[in-house]
Image: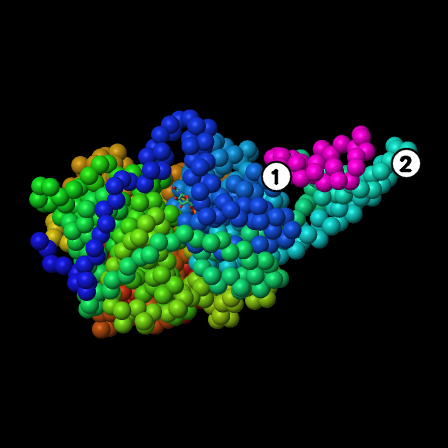
Amino acid sequence: MPPKVIFPKQPDLPAESSAPAHSKKHHAAKRDYRTLALQLKPQREGLPIFSARASIIQQVRSHPTVIIVGETGSGKTTQIPQYLLESGFTSNTRAIAVTQPRRVAATSIAKRVAEEVGTSLGGRVGYTIRFEDCSSDKTRLRFCTDGLLLREILSDPLLRRYSVVILDEAHERTLRTDILLGMLKDIQRERARLALLNQQHLELTETATRQYEEPEDHQWSHRDHRSHGTHVTFDTPQEPEKEEEQEEEELQFEDQPTPVIDDVHGDVTGIDELKVIVMSATLDAERFSGYFDSAPILYVAGRQFPVTTYYTTTPQADYLDSAHLATLQIHTETPSNSGDVLVFLSGQEDIENVERLLLESAASFPPGVPALLPCPIFAALPQAQQSRVFDPAPEFTRKIILATNIAETSLTIPGIRHVIDSGVHKVRGFDPRIGESLLVEPISKSSARQRTGRAGREAAGFCYRLYTEADYAQLAEDSVPEIKRCQLSMVVLQLKAAGVADVMQFNFMDRPSKKALKHALLELFALEALDDHGELTAMGRWMSEFPLEPTYAKVIYASQKAGCTREAIDVVSLLSVDSLFYVPADKREESNAAQLVFKSTEGDHLTFLNLLRAYTKVNGDREWCQEHFVNRRNMRHVLDVRQQLNRLCARLGLDIDRSCGTDLDAVLKCFLSGFFHNCALLQPDGTYRSLSGSQTVHIHPGSSLFAKKVPAIFYDQLVFTNKLHARAVSAADPLWIAQASPKLYGRLNSGAS
Ligand code: CDP
Ligand code: MG
């Protein structure tokens, strides 16, 4: 037996007789939408939120903004949009948008809701995420990422396509959620103003028509305009009481036409109020309410079984090892039908490491030990592999879900009874001196509690914290909102493109520091997205249409002139995943040797390009990937991203076939035109010092430039573990750096070379 992670006492586990019944049902009759929807109905009606249906609808009718708080799994995300759909909140021209901070959540929840509604995905219910649109003109419930809705504001400043916007997972306070909160508030105010104009105009028109067409003794004065415009027929005058009834009934209709108004206020035709619903899984909703002029808060009671929590007796040196061992311990010491295991890790790399360790251990299980099925779930996981997490495990097999904090509140995975909490997550950090970096950091107490809660959704459960009780006591109460700790240039660019002239004055719920805002403005200026007056340049506008950080958008923009758009798109796609190779701990040398064939002396960007070219030549052959330790899952994602980028660039008018062939310096120069902030110069003592903040940066051991000295480097990203590591590093001629941004680094021109 392997060594154990020591918890003070072993859980005493009751065995469950069977897997949750609904997962079996879930499997049945996939082809028949309606049958499946009917089957799911009792489950829908059994959710805690169902009893609040009427009051939710009533509150949303009577207030522009409503805050809804409910325990994870109570049914907020899947049910509330459906309640509104069923109650006539959409029309032929207005849909409901539901935003999620993460792609995986948006797609998997849309799939589930389409099943519950009884329609095909992409029909009445659909999703749109960056690089992927599964929706149509018919879509009335659109799940999307918060970033995507932000981008929609650029082309539809009043969000006319929507009658309701639901901001889900607001407690996470992602950067984009925060910006959306501010923009939605402005849009709501503007639409209310226009709707009022609209209403007044409608009243005037109607009065004029009545006087013209009808005798005076008709009793129309009882009609009020809440009864939605054109389909209301005035032929037979009715008693007021009956009208009330009829109005209620009419609201039940879906797809009602919106009033059409003629010429005078042409630009406000059909504008109506925008309803905003803010949903959160934690109790601190007062701040949202205060921000939206004392919007009402609805609390939905949850259903939570007791969870026994264990701490380790000593701090763990390596949480990945501990997570692996704790999983084996649960798996071998508790009956396999006592529930699945959910392990919280920091990111894709952790997840793939633990997956590998588990598979290696499982290969040598003695007879009689049930099988174990690791199911990873993280943001970049291809859609096809996501559903494995929700599918029931085969018999005598236990699912081990390996997740990032995506499973904390946004996804409810059925069947979990054991949670292993590593105590860490990966966050974006920003320091003007070093730029943006990714950090693996301790979670907050609030996150730890959410993670624990996931074990008690269906029955009593167990949570194993891979840290000591004393360490828990040291955790911060809540996480810091992302807007306070990350790079703001992309959102500042979007705010500018949406017409917010003075971003310093924008109505933030939590104001980022002036320093961070200024830094973003300065970076956009250096990228030439803003001009001397802080206004968007033509290139800035082009960049804002691009669903990428402005740095990448700039690279692709520059590649047109340089004649290497094909290569630029290739490399940008390659940089969209965490790792292209996998390096098993015990085969490090073998793996390094196998990768040598791709190695470019210029560094990682061109090494990656070589890899992609070779991969394409063998058509992604599985054995070839194994031989070369290539991460096939991620390569497929790269191809996906490339295809979408190609489409987008073609739509934005770029010639995507411009290729530089073998003159690859052009590609590196293009990257520098976006990444001149991410440069470091070799020092006499052999270290590299960043240009923007004079910090010592170390080349990541996985880089092809590791152990090599070149006068200057540029890098895609900094990762802080025990020291600052630059990832995806290439050599740069100091002169190129100076040319890339004369505004910032002109001084290099004379000095460094
Ligand atoms: O948003 P909230 O956390 O309140 O709950 P939800 O995501 O709407 O999930 C409600 C219920 O739907 C969960 O308890 C799950 O049992 C079920 N569900 C599911 O079975 N499969 C999915 N893909 C999503 C939800
Ligand atoms: Mg939810």
Which residue position is annotated with label 2? 217
Quarter of the image where ligand 1 sits? top left
Q: Which residues are magenta?
A: 231-256
Contact, mark 1 vs mark 2 (Cβ under 8 Å): no
In the image shown, does 677 or 231 lie closer to the viewer?
Answer: 231
Q: Nearer the viewer, mark 1 or mark 2?
A: 2
Q: In which image quadrant can residue 495 be found?
A: bottom right
Give the side of residue 562 with respect to residue 596, left or right: right
Q: Disc 1 versus disc 2: distance between alpha carbons? A: 33 Å
Is 236 a magenta residue? yes
Picture residue at 52% right of the left edge, 67% below the top: 511
Is 548 a magenta residue? no
**What secondary structure is found at the residue carrying circle 1?**
loop
All told, the count of numbered labels is: 2
In the rendered image, the quadrant that contains the C terminus is bottom left
Which residue position is annotated with label 1? 88
Give the side of residue 163 with respect to residue 428, left or right: right
**What secondary structure is found at the residue carrying circle 2?**
loop
In the image shown, does 211 or 556 lie closer to the viewer?
Answer: 211
Q: Position of residue 463 (x, y in %)?
A: 28, 57
Q: At label 1, which amino acid type do we have?
A: Gly
In the image shown, does 683 or 345 lie closer to the viewer?
Answer: 345
Residue that sits furthest to the right in the current view: 216
Picture residue at 19% right of the left edge, 39% below the top: 396
Picture residue at 65% right of the left edge, 51% below the top: 62
